[in-house]
Amino acid sequence: MTQIIAVSNQKGGVGKTTTAVNLSASVAVAGYRSLLIDLDPQRNASTSLSIKNTRNNIYSALTDKIPVREVIHETSIRNLAIIPSIEDLAALEFEISHASMREQYLKNCLAGSIDDFEFVFIDCPPSFSVLSLNAWVCANYVLIPLQCEYYALEGLVSLLNNVLRIKRTFNKGFEVSGIILTMYDKRSSLSQQIEADARKNLGGKVFRTVIPRNIKIAEAPSHGKPVLLYDIRCPGTLAYLDLAAEFLKKHEKGGRDHV
């Protein structure tokens, strides 16, 4: 059964797209057929996987009724495919703002077309918008990257309240997969304090694996690669591979041999 995970945070600059790209790549490397959907008009997930502007994108599937299977692009990583974004996706907010069942567009678009994938990751915009609403209504889980800074914790409360609203109103099966501490600096007392507060207040919802500040993670997108293709031995790669193993265990799918 396909599991759909929305990677989301209402705050920008928290490692959301970085996590969506590198976690989906790491899960694919573990042997699971994975799909990344770039639902952010900034299309950073697309460029991080060397996908240029193309008419076969998520906006075309949502508005021009191009079949979903025609907008899926394979990547340089075996088992990982992507549905890219385009800047025009920002217009969808206005185009469907008064439409009935506007929150169901993505769910209806994908229905019956992604069954070949074991995991589908959706990179959401850095805001709670119509696009994010569509992702949350479509998804089984939300995965929340949390930057190790004070204001990030404040915004998390609002985000979790929105999860409860969506669960009550549109998607009863919607759950939090987990919270990922990103941009962690083990030398920083602030990072340590944020981690302690998050684990104290959120318990098992916080992944044990933390994603460190790492220059290789920051450099990889400019080369159109996930960090595991850019530098297999760097701390960022090792962290995302550990996160993938923990994620797969949490979702009751132990990692397989590499294929």
Image: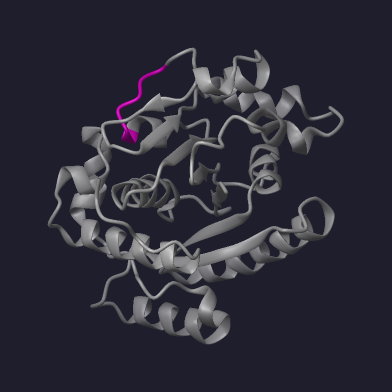
Against 194, residue 245 (above or below) is above
Is 141 on the left-hand or right-hand side of 146? right
- For the stretch drawn in magenta, what is the main secondary structure? loop
Q: How many marks?
A: 0
Q: Position of residue 72 (x, y in %)?
A: 46, 25
Is 140 on the left-hand or right-hand side of 81? right
Describe the colour scheme in one phrase.
one colour
Q: Position of residue 185 (x, y in %)?
A: 27, 71
Q: Position of residue 177 (x, y in %)?
A: 55, 63
Is 35 on the left-hand or right-hand side of 218? right
Is 85 on the left-hand or right-hand side of 156? left
| Quadrant for the C terminus in the image | top left
Residue numbers of the magenta segment: 48-53
The part of the image, by quadrant, that contains residue 105 is: top right
Query: Measuring 58% from the left and 69% from the top, which residue is drawn there?
Result: 154
Against 258, residue 252 (above or below) is below
Q: Nearer the viewer, residue 212 or 65?
A: 65
Q: Position of residue 208 (x, y in %)?
A: 39, 76
Q: Nearer the viewer, residue 109 or 156?
A: 109
